[in-house]
Amino acid sequence: MITKQGFGLAFGLPIETAVEQLHATARELEAAAEKVSARGESFGQRIKAAVQRRLSCSHGPRADGGESFGQKVKQAVERRSGRTQHARQTDAERSRYRQQLRKRTMGE
């Protein structure tokens, strides 16, 4: 600790009080860091485990024998796709406006 008396202020407090609070905060942060590292698992390992848990739940075999969510989305996109609608519409218009060849006359 600093025992020097002065009239300076830090953080709106006398210098001695501010320094004491900073040291106390540093001790608390060091203790918290030791607790986190004592767990044995890093943040990355915890994230990896959470992702694996999430993936294993969503991609497991279906009891009802239904399709997966990805397959349902794919089919919905195909149904809503402008390409398939356009193809259906052009086929309908082709059959509607199909030109019939006229019969040839004797002069042709």
Image (tube, grey):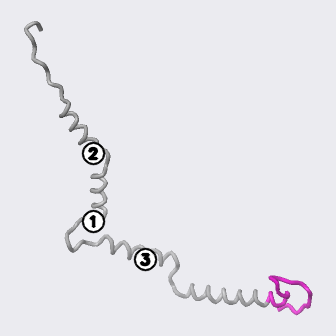
- The magenta span reads 1-19
Q: Quadrant of residue 54?
A: bottom left
Residue at image x 25%, y 37%?
90
- Of the numbered discs 3 and 1, the one sitting upstream in the chain is 3
Q: Quadrant of residue 37?
A: bottom right
Tell me where residue 41 appears, x and y as whole percent: 50, 82
Circle 1 residue:
68
15 sits to left or right of 103: right
Residue at image x 27%, y 65%?
68
Asked whether 75 falls inside the magenta stretch, the response is no
Circle 3 residue:
50
Nearer to us: label 2 or label 1: 2
Q: Amino acid at mark 1?
A: Ser
State the residue in front, 90 or 17: 90
Circle 2 residue:
85
Distance from the alpha carbon under mark 2 to that under mark 1: 25 Å
Nearer to us: label 3 or label 1: 1
Q: Are marks 2 and 1 in contact (CB under 8 Å)?
A: no
- Of the numbered discs 2 and 3, the one sitting upstream in the chain is 3
Residue at image x 42%, y 73%?
51
Asked whether 9 falls inside the magenta stretch, the response is yes
